[in-house]
Image (cartoon, grey):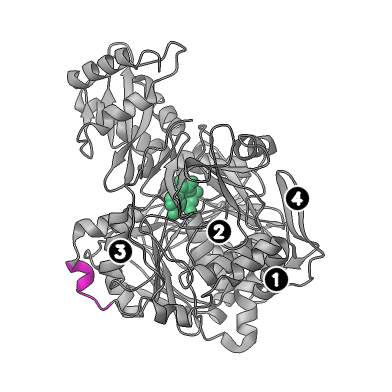
Amino acid sequence: MSEPTIGVFEVEDRSFPPPPAFAGAALANDRALYDEAEIDYEAFWARQARELLTWHKDFDTTLEWELPFAKWFVGGQLNVTENCLDRHVEAGRGDKVAYHWEGEPGDRVTITYAELLTEVKKFANVLKDQGLEKGDRVAIYMPMILELPIAMLACARIGVAHSVIFGGFSADAIVDRCVDAEARLIVTADAGYRRGAAAALKPTVDEALASGAPSVERVIVVNRCDTAPAMVEGRDLWWHDVMANASEDCPAEPMDSEQLLYLLYTSGTTAKPKGIMHTTGGYLAQVAFTHKYTFDIKPETDVYWCAADIGWVTGHSYIVYGPLTNGMTSVMYEGTPDTPGKDRLWDIVERYGVTQLYTAPTAIRMFMKWGAQEPAKHDLSTLRVLGTVGEPINPEAWMWYHEHIGGSSRPIVDTWWQTETGGHMISPLPGVTTTKPGSACHPIPGVFAELVDDAGNKVEVGGGYLTITRPWPSMLRGIWGDPERYRDTYWSTYEGKYFAGDGAKLDSDGYLWLLGRVDDVMNVSGHRISTTEVESALVDHPAVAEAAVVGATDELTGQAIVGYVILRGTHEASDALGNEIREHVGLKLGKIARPKTVIIVPDLPKTRSGKIMRRLLRDVADGRVLGDTTTLADPGVVAEIANRAAENDDD
Ligand code: WTA
């Protein structure tokens, strides 16, 4: 395991207690929830599950734990969409706005809970008409439009598991995920708006299905941008056609608590993405609990906005399932934050009176670069709580967020969690916790974390590896089709503990400081990308013989992907070839995985046992200014690698 490489902070002694007025009105402003969970965490979660969710049938057993396999709320039955929709409508809140949706070009749709429920029932009937049954899987590859949560919820209504594939992924990524999940149907759109233009999606699905994924029988296409994609006779259907005659009557199927709700693929340390499994009762309970208390929601008056993409777990839990379960009014935005201007987000906050904003450190650093004059153009005084997620937040970005977005008076919740954890795990509670800029503070009530050293001994103060010591309701239930990999990846490093893959530091006040991944997973703009996956895509290019990928430190994106490549045979190093290799990775995996820089080298430094010296390569990359498309074939780099390799011969 390597040392954590990002976010190694100086000692930080600023601290921010909850503003008294905020704490006075907060849902939690003392340690009661922590104390309750400390005494009996199963009883604590059982109470949350019963109070926050509506059950068809109450559960008999809170937790069955056969390490590493957990079952929560066993014997209970519920339907996720009843919790997200029906019960709000039945309680007379059908006219309440579920989403204020805003398209990038400026088109707007407001959808109420009653309207959303109708759309979900109709699309659930469409899925049934296409022969989908409880237990099947549907892939969803869509832009940030309302049909995306509608499609997810329609699956949940009838017990079909969805597998959302981020709209920036490539055809190959679609094939891998559809093959692994044996998806029977794909829901997509012709395109979505990004930076003022229609970014095509349907042609990528066509490309995927031309090369593989034989399980896919149908493709349903939303017409978002009028790009008139080719439609394959007998396979492709327009959303508006199938919805036109769909019945509005679709009772919710009661699901067992442990019924699969969704798969979400995430990068691990090997080339094959893992299908993370989330089930129904435990997932919904923890997501509802954390959404409620981390953001101190007041559903009657708040307008909540998580500015993530639903293609990632943050969007699943905190745009769709958490906020809807809690009956919130949310904002949902399709496009990029700088279209048409760099104040787009602040314009949205002002116009809808947003009260909670949830975004990522990489976005905050970008806003810093754009300058404080952009948010200053707008009235942001409605904001009450600011959230961040996805990567360690550097104190400078935290302070900027605090001052320029939060008017120096709003609590910031830095939430640490993972696709695998389903919901927040380590985070302040805004009315309770005194925060420190850059620290995610403490585990939430009901979650138990421990830092350990290489030998697995508990670390009281200082650096170590983050583990979770007890099961939690929204934990992954496994890796789709690979129970052994689940055990090996998460539960075999430290006996009896969940190993998160992150390094962290505990300070003498007991605050946790997350330091980044300690495995071969990079974190670029809050997105997890596997070095191995990028390496395989690099060597897939005909000119590349061997490749090594490292995550170099990057001011804006946290880490940046740098690929070192050795060329095959007679290929000549050139910027043009380097760029072609970069683009090849973009095509194979999607643009987010395209290396910032490709460095062409005659050789890769290896230890005597033949392992590539990655730390050395990272140091070399860290030591130079890397442009956005640089491809270096620079003799200086080669000499530096050789010199350092000689110094480190016994690394
Ligand atoms: C990192 C995103 C520091 C971490 C919800 C984790 C963070 C990985 C934080 C999971 C945070 C997420 N502070 N690091 N607040 N939040 N991470 O699966 O390395 O896309 O293991 O889930 O992001 O990324 P994932």
Residue wearing tag 3:
401
Q: Is residue 612 above or below residue 555?
A: above
* Mark 4 or mark 2: whose residue is earlier in sequence: 4
* Mark 1 or mark 4: whose residue is earlier in sequence: 1
Q: Which residue is drawn at the image coordinates 52% and 66% (left, top)?
A: 320
Residue 71 locus on image (x, y percent): 74, 54
Q: Dot 4: what SS? A: strand
Residue 516 locus on image (x, y percent): 42, 43
Disc 1 marks a residue whose amino acid type is Arg
- Are the two marked residues, 2 and 3, in contact with CB atoms closer than 8 angstroms? no
Mark 1, other Cα within 10 Å: few <14 / some 14–19 / many ≥20: some
Q: Dot 3: what SS? A: helix
Q: Dot 1: what SS? A: helix
Disc 3 marks a residue whose amino acid type is Tyr
Residue wearing tag 2:
423
Disc 4 marks a residue whose amino acid type is Trp
* Mark 2 or mark 3: whose residue is earlier in sequence: 3
